[in-house]
Image (cartoon, helix red, strand yellow):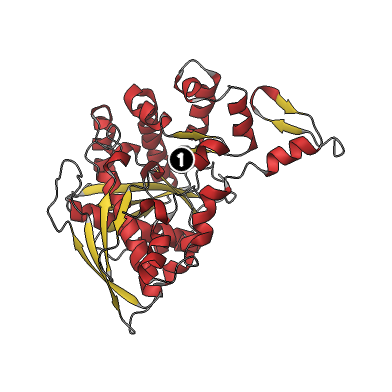
Amino acid sequence: MKRRQFVMMASGGVLLAATGAATAFVTTRTPQAALQPWRDAGSLYEEPRRRALSYAILAPNPHNRQPWLVDLAGDDQVVLYVDTKRVLPHTDPFNRQITIGLGCFLELMSMAAASDGYRVQTELFPEGEDSGRLDTRPVARIRFIADAAIEPDPLFAHALERRSLKEPYDLARPVPDAVLASLKGAGQYGNTINVAGEPDHVAALRDLTHRALDIEISTPHTYKESVDLFRIGKAEIEADPDGIDFGGPLFDTLALLGQFTRETALDTGSIVYAQGRDVVMANVDTAMAHVWLVSSGNNRADQIAAGRDWLRINLAATAAGVGLQPLSQALQEFPEMAGCHAEAHQKLAPDGGTVQMLARLGYAAPVAPSPRWPLTAKLI
């Protein structure tokens, strides 16, 4: 076996039997260009705004849509816009989750600026806002101000290690109370952060998130929104380093053989659909604890603040060495999700407010970072 260097592809017993050819195929499936922004962060630019933005583009965001556009105004300003072509009209009809992603972007940018000795002065929605849908008006106008007294945020040290760990978690490894406490104390923007690791509470949230995910997958228009954003294999990921990536030798091979395509994924009678559904359900069903964030209001400023604290929770989880994966399905506002949405708020915010984010916590092997567009693709 060692001499012949067989490479087994899991689905349907696909087998590549070769010597150098199979090895070369496996070792060249990493989408290097799509991952380059993670290597470039903080090192490619000397100008303070670009240096800070080179980190900000790595922020977590829904479906990895990377919905930010940036105008470098004058010598010391950044104007942030939303790319209205990168919203999620079916699963996020009011752009609430997209706005949270923009809040994550702003917080990571602010942290990066502080690490270089700059304080940022941020004015949100300087030309007004629409509570129903984001538009082409600025999301934020930011000014960079040199400040020798500003101190770096300790969480920023973990920015390049942050991942969304979308794998089944170790059912034999609970999340320690000290780790949960560190997440609960990570916020700075007025949101309530709650955690739960008790078996009964975890079981109840596993059940809720399972049912909510099943609704999103079983609802044709919301499921198709995700499938349309599949990036299958290295070539697609490099061409469009956003959306939901399926990279590596297995997916490249299945794509080349026509076994895994957007069409087969949409076919609810296909093996691809059945196996894919089992995989994502295994994730929610192995949650070992949960963390969620509640804001008192739900206007655009509240959603931005939720995103800023959500970024901090992500970095606190990274610092503590625990995996985190958002489970936002039950919080989505499309009609078919109304029952789970109401249940989520009853369970997670019984005293009122809006549950802005929910995630599972646990332990699994490390994963690679998500693909990213380079900063140059996001500059106006």
68 or 12, which lies in front? Answer: 68
- Where disc 1 sits, the SS reads loop
- What residue would you read off at disc 1? 240
Which quadrant would the C terminus be assigned to in this image?
A: bottom left
**Residue 194: image x %, image y %?**
33, 55
**Residue 182: image x %, image y %?**
41, 64
149 above or below 280? below
Residue at 46% x, 62% y: name it.
Answer: 159
255 above or below 134? above
Callout 1 amino acid: Asp
Q: Residues within 10 Å of mark 1 (few under 14, many from 20)?
A: some
Which quadrant would the N terminus be assigned to in this image?
A: top right
Residue at 47% x, 67% y: name it.
Answer: 42
160 or 18, which lies in front? Answer: 18
296 or 95, which lies in front? Answer: 95
260 above or below 84? above
Residue 48 visible to the viewer: yes
Residue at 45% x, 58% y: name it.
Answer: 317
